[in-house]
Amino acid sequence: MTIETSYRYEQISPKAYEHPADRAATSALHAVPLLDTVIKRLIDLGHEKRLRQVVLGNAVKLGPEQVPEVWRRYVHATTVLDLPNVPDLYAFNGADANAMTLGANHPIIVAKSSLLSSYTDDEVQTVLAHEAGHVLSEHYYYTTALVLLRQFLEGSLPKSLLLGLPVRAMYLALLEWSRAAELSADRAAALVRGDPLDPCRLMMRLAGGALPGMSFEAFLKQATEYQSEDDLFSRNARFWAELRMSHPFAVRRVKELVEWVQSGEYDRIRAGSYPRRGQEPAPSAEFEAAVAAYRAKFTRFLDRTAGDVQRLGRQFNDWLKARAPAGAGGAPAGEPAT
């Protein structure tokens, strides 16, 4: 199948479009005591592989001979972003219009059938371009960890697996990171589509459904009003509502994307002025300050459960010793649900 593309961001670095909050939150996660070690151990125990098997065994792999139009638009999106490799794409039967990228080392993209069948071709490509942005930014590692921790909290993984660890605090930290990562993927979708309003229109539809008479202009006004809310009670309620969400509110995402375009960054990238892979600029003092802020926030999440960072370190070490490679074969196995 011939894939035609009129635009390609050759060797574009994800740092070109990543939201500052995403970059800072990702860097701060690396500083959480032994968090990466625990995630790697979860993956080494095979739970990520089980998750993949559940998806692969109950989904349809798309390609040139399987739903070819969706596949063509998907490959077009990955080509525009100049992805080194095109991850496999699967359709999964589900009622909610959604898609996600999974896999600690080799990502796959899973799109719900309700999205692929009920949305326009342009809207579907916008979603797939969003997921391609996650792939280029390598968000899939922490996304997979987030799914595994959620399954543990919901009882789909054995309770003995992470016994003694502040799982809920780690989960909240990853949710905070996930909300920031979504803002980056929205920007990637805008770059692929060549129209930053396409992701905004899609978010309106995802938020309110395909209702006749919807006004995009009114939705943009709503996003502005939401951002300028100065009532402290409302802002506090908003904070607690978002705390357990993996995605920011739709109106906030629209506002963030519009402000990015207004800053001129979108047009600069479209004109070819962007950092290439391996040529990223050094972190600035402002970036380091943002990392420190997220690190403090994540530490507070962990402190509420673990008591203090030193105690957290001891918990991690005890857990790792109990799960040493020599005894890993006897680790209880759970069947994750998707």
Image: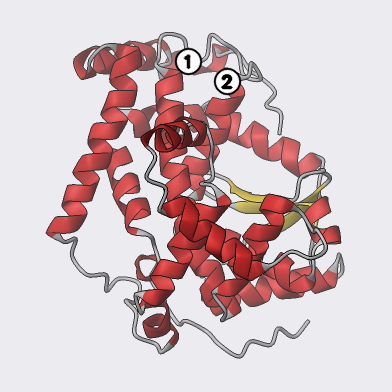
Secondary structure beneath dot 1 equals: loop
> Looking at the picture, how far across and down is residue 13, in whole percent?
38, 70
Q: Are marks 1 and 2 in contact (CB under 8 Å)?
A: yes
Q: Nearer the viewer, residue 198 or 78?
A: 198
Residue 207 appears in the figure: yes
What residue sits 67% from the left and 73% below the top? 75
> Looking at the picture, how far across and down is residue 38, in whole percent?
40, 27
Residue 253 appears in the figure: no
Q: Which label is found at residue 162?
A: 1
Residue type, mark 2 in image: Phe
Q: Residues within 10 Å of mark 2 (few under 14, many from 20)?
A: many
Sequence-wise first label, 1 or 2: 2
Q: How is the image coloured?
A: secondary structure
Q: Calculate the distance from the C-alpha at mark 1 to the C-alpha at mark 2.
A: 8 Å
Residue type, mark 1 in image: Leu
> Looking at the picture, how far across and down is residue 220, in whole percent?
56, 65
User: Quarter of the image holding residue 176?
Assistant: top left
